[in-house]
Image (cartoon, rainbow, N blue to C red):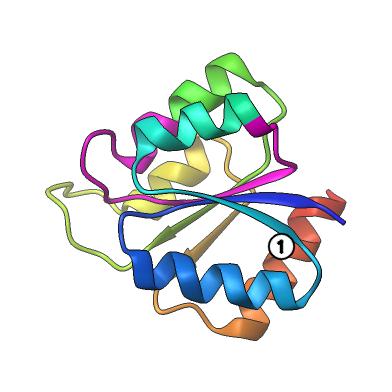
Amino acid sequence: MARILVVDDDPLTRRVIRRTLEREGYEIFEAGDGDAGVRAFRENRPDLVILDIYMPEKEGLEAILDLRTEFKDVKIIAISGGGGIFKLDPLQTAKHFGVAETLIKPIDRDILLASVRATLES
């Protein structure tokens, strides 16, 4: 089964995503910010990254750029609950950075699973 890295500064969000995906048989790794997420990707080489946009240390858009620079074919789903200082829609910006899917928090279980399956199959 696929290996997925979940990067979000909110432990509750990570836990909900982890449990949802583990029930489907996925192997899950976690990181609490963009810097830790990039390091975790290097160490574990997951098949997919689910990455929050607004986080401390290194925000999601920065982490996406870092991952894309180092790993051209990385599959990423960007998630966001809003907030931040950007005037632009950060999920739309993430699409321009090459993410496969964008999801708005709170994330519906069925939409999450369908997005993960579609992204892994692409």
Measured along the vertical axis of the image, is residue 90 above or below residue 117?
above
Q: Classify residue 4 as left or right of residue 62.
A: right
> With 41 as the anchor, is 32 left or right in this view?
left
Three-letter amino acid code of the residue under disc 1: Val
Q: Is residue 19 above or below residue 62?
A: below
Vertical relation: 21 (above or below) 52: below
Horizontal placement of 7 versus 33: left or right?
A: right
Identify which residue is drawn at 63% across, 77% down: 20
The reply to whether the magenta stretch includes residue 55 is yes
Task: Give how far across and how far down residue 111 sits, in percent.
Answer: 63, 78
The image shows a total of numbered marks equal to 1
The secondary structure type at the circle numbered 1 is: helix
In magenta, the rendered stretch is 44-64
Q: Residues within 10 Å of mark 1 (few under 14, many from 20)?
A: many
The quarter of the picture where residue 117 lies is bottom right
Residue denoted by label 1: 116
Q: Residue at x 62, y 73 (%)?
A: 112
Observer-nearest of 93 and 45: 45
In front here: 106 or 13?
13
Q: Looking at the image, which residue is at 53% across and 26% down?
A: 67
Residue 65 location, quadrant: top left
In depth, the one of 98 and 105 nearer the eye is 105
Q: Nearer the viewer, residue 73 or 44?
A: 44
58 drawn magenta: yes
Residue 44, x across and y down, in percent: 66, 33
Residue 71 in the image: x percent, y percent? 64, 21
In this view, the residue farthest toward the top is 70
Q: Residue at x 35, y 50 (%)?
A: 53
Quarter of the figure that contains the N terminus: bottom right
Q: Residue 41 in the image: x percent, y percent? A: 58, 32
